[in-house]
Amino acid sequence: MGLKRFKTVALIVAFSFVLPVSAALAGAPNTFTRDTRWNDTYSKGMKLFKERCAVCHGENGEGKIGLPLNLQSFLTVASKDYIKKTIVYGRPSRGMPEFGKLLKPEEIDAIATYVKAWQYEPSKAVEEGVVVGDPFEGAKWYKGICANCHGRKGEGGPQVGGGGHVIASFAGFSAPALADPGFQKSATDGFIKATLMYGRIGTPMSSYLKGGQGTVELTEEDINDIVAYIRTMPPVKAASK
């Protein structure tokens, strides 16, 4: 093979490794225009995340005391609005401050921009509006398959070293409190439904939609019932300081 032809082939091979990454970024859902303004927002969000969030969620969103955020199974169903509301309302029962009282709106937007930028897989379809279901039937499913991790009243798993739960301890964190007022204000019905349908790959949270190869398979109607039940949960008390 001549030197000129060798260089051409080498260039094509090298480019083939770069292209998928570039294409993934260019075609990613919630793609931002990588201009100076976006870069400034991203940089501000990264700085604020490391100052305010990393101690609980990990330097790269891998999770510590707080849940992991850098998961495609989370980011593909969590809208930027959900992340912003989570920051604003916090999780009072779990010790996460209401940062809406501590940070400016543009700072909250910057953190959400930074977190959302971790997403590279396509967003999943998330149902809008109110999910209609039977909370009575949903309570049966919840107590049978959800309460073991999320608590019988939606109070979440114990927050102690290693997750404090037989299953969650393998991941090093505990299941979130679904009755937390911050969660209830932040999460849409569609977000809760999508989480039940697709699960959280990388955590003990399984996919529950029939055909999803989870440990338990439910129909979409069953999942609607669970969502309806979660919406009836009385708010849990704020964590003691």
Image (cartoon, helix red, strand yellow):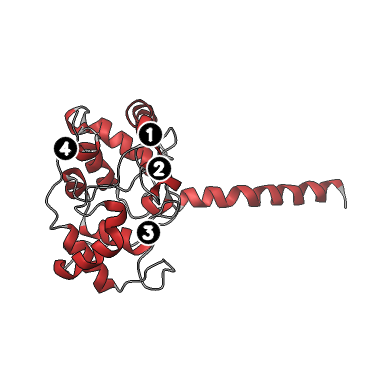
Mark 3: which secondary structure? Answer: loop
Task: Assess whether mark 3 and mark 4 are in contact (beta carbons under 8 angstroms).
Answer: no
Q: Are marks 1 and 2 in contact (CB under 8 Å)?
A: yes
Q: Is mark 1 on a helix, strand or loop?
A: helix
Mark 1 or mark 4: which comes first in sequence? 1
Viewer-side label of 1, 3: 3
- The tag on residue 238 is 4
Residue at x-position 41% and y-position 45%: 169
Query: Is residue 33 depicted above or below 103 in this figure?
Result: below
Residue 194 visible at all:
no
Coordinates of residue 122 in the picture (x, y in percent): 42, 57
Residue depicted at x 28% and y 72%? 220
Tag in front: 4 or 2: 4
Q: Distance between the residues labelled 3 and 2?
A: 21 Å
Q: Is residue 64 left or right of residue 4?
A: left
Which mark is in front, 4 or 3? 4
Q: Distance between the residues labelled 1 and 4?
A: 31 Å
First in residue order: circle 1 vs circle 2 = 1
Measure the alpha-carbon separation of dots 4 and 2: 31 Å
Residue contact at pointers 1 and 4, CB within 8 angstroms: no
**Element at badge 4?**
loop
- Residue 233 position by quadrant: bottom left
Residue 42 marker: 1
Q: Position of residue 208 (x, y in %)?
A: 35, 66
Residue at the disc numbered 2? 117
Q: Eyeballing the image, is 130 above or below 166?
A: below
Q: What residue is disc 3 on?
A: 199
Taking depth in this image into account, of 221 and 112 the one nearest to the observer is 221
Give residue 50's mark.
none
Nearest the viewer among 97 and 30 is 97
